[in-house]
Image (cartoon, grey):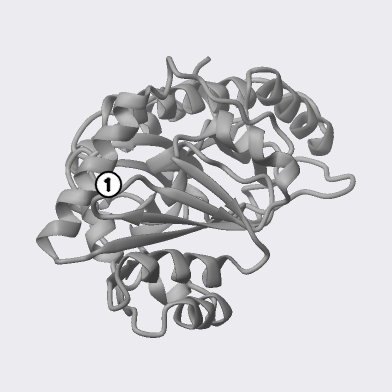
Amino acid sequence: MRRGLIARSPAELPYAALDARLARVRTAMRATALDALIVYTNNTRPAGVSWLTGFIPYWSEALLVLPRDRDPALVVALTFRVKTWIERTSRVAEVVHTPRIGLEAGRRIAAQKADAAVGIVDLDHLSAGIADDLLEGGPRLALRDAGALFAHARAVADQAEVALAQKAAAIARHALAQIPPDRAELGEMLAAAEAAARRQGAEEIYLAAAPDLAHDYRLHRIEGHVACGARFAVRASVAYKGSWVRMVRTIGCDAAASRAAAAQLAAAARGLPGERGFADFSSWLVEGCRMAQPLEPLMGSRVVPTHPPAAGMLVSIAGRLDIGGAPVLIGAPALVGGDLLADPIGD
């Protein structure tokens, strides 16, 4: 369950941007003869529905039902008492409340066309119970996977999406700047970083750390009292109005090493979707949103199979470099084939 405030900002996410996204998806639906599209959302897989409507659930689950030629409806398992909040924070024609979201979605589509061709975004990850309920509600519906269709339609980030990611990146950078290199207790430092992010409007922030890079490079959640080594790394995963980014910073290395690492990360971003820019990285990872998972592994030193991102797609990239005989972990969001959205070093 999320803890930060989720509120709509027409200035940051205007209706015109959402309408343009719907139009792109509908064009793809017509090209593939789909009568309707269904996108699943919950608090861990919110990115598909939020991209189309602005809706972000605190908890529970929902299905966005997008007919090819009619307004979208959101079928939610949330109680009726949050109806007005959903209507304030999302752009859908109708909000329907029911404990069996698949059954209701299937009935609504079948009422318009009994044998409709229905695309399911990321069908392989839709629960069997919801899929069964869809067919109970519409026994003659033809369900198809529409993951590739949706991923292609949303691949290139629009102006509103880039601006939200830049804001999320600024929050992440400010949060990491609250971690000084001369304090020994990591838990206190991470608490200060989280508080700073919340004050700047983060809907969510997850912090992970590698407390002593001399012994372990792995980033993980910190619980209890943990002392830091001379050099440690922290990763901030931040959500702001549905936009998720990651930023990684190494604390305790000198300014020259930090700048060298940032320059190599920026060069790698400009070289995407190619891998040549990562040749000097000991390990690396590119994450982005194709469907519903906000930060899905797309390519990297240990990612199989790969999903090379399109030029203009928003991604978060991270990696480990050995500079001057010591490890440096670094990461930041970027546009594929373009620049980093924020300097991962300064604030």
Amino acid at dot 1: Arg
- In the rendering, at what x and y percent does residue 40 appear? 48, 60
Q: Residue furthest left?
A: 31
Of residues 344 and 287, the one drawn nearer to the viewer in this rendering: 287
Circle 1 SS class: loop
Q: Residue at x 62, y 28 (%)?
A: 202
254 over 249 or under it: above or below: above
- Image vertical order of residue 254 relative to residue 281, above or below: above
Task: Pick the residue in front: 246 or 10.
Answer: 10
Position of residue 5 relative to residue 150, above or below, is above
Mark 1 Cα shell of 10 Å, populated few (<14), some (14-19), many (≥20) = many
In the rendered view, would you say 298 is above or below 214?
A: below
Q: How many marks?
A: 1
Query: Label 1, on which residue?
Result: 154
Name the residue located 41 percent from the left edge and 24 percent from the top edge: 13
29 sits left or right of 172 in the view = left
Residue 265 left/right relative to 337: right
The residue positioned farthest toward the front in the image shown: 111
| Residue at screen point 27% across, 46% down | 154
**Pick the front one: 311 or 201:** 201
The residue at the point 63 percent across, 24 percent down is: 175
Identify which residue, 336 or 231, lies in the foreground. 336
* Rendered location of residue 184, percent (x, y): 82, 32
Quarter of the image holding residue 140? Answer: bottom left
x%, y% of residue 286? 36, 51
Residue 159 image offset from top left, x and y in percent: 28, 25
Quarter where residue 306 is shown: bottom left
Query: Does the image show residue 42?
Result: yes
- In the rendered image, is residue 302 in sight? no
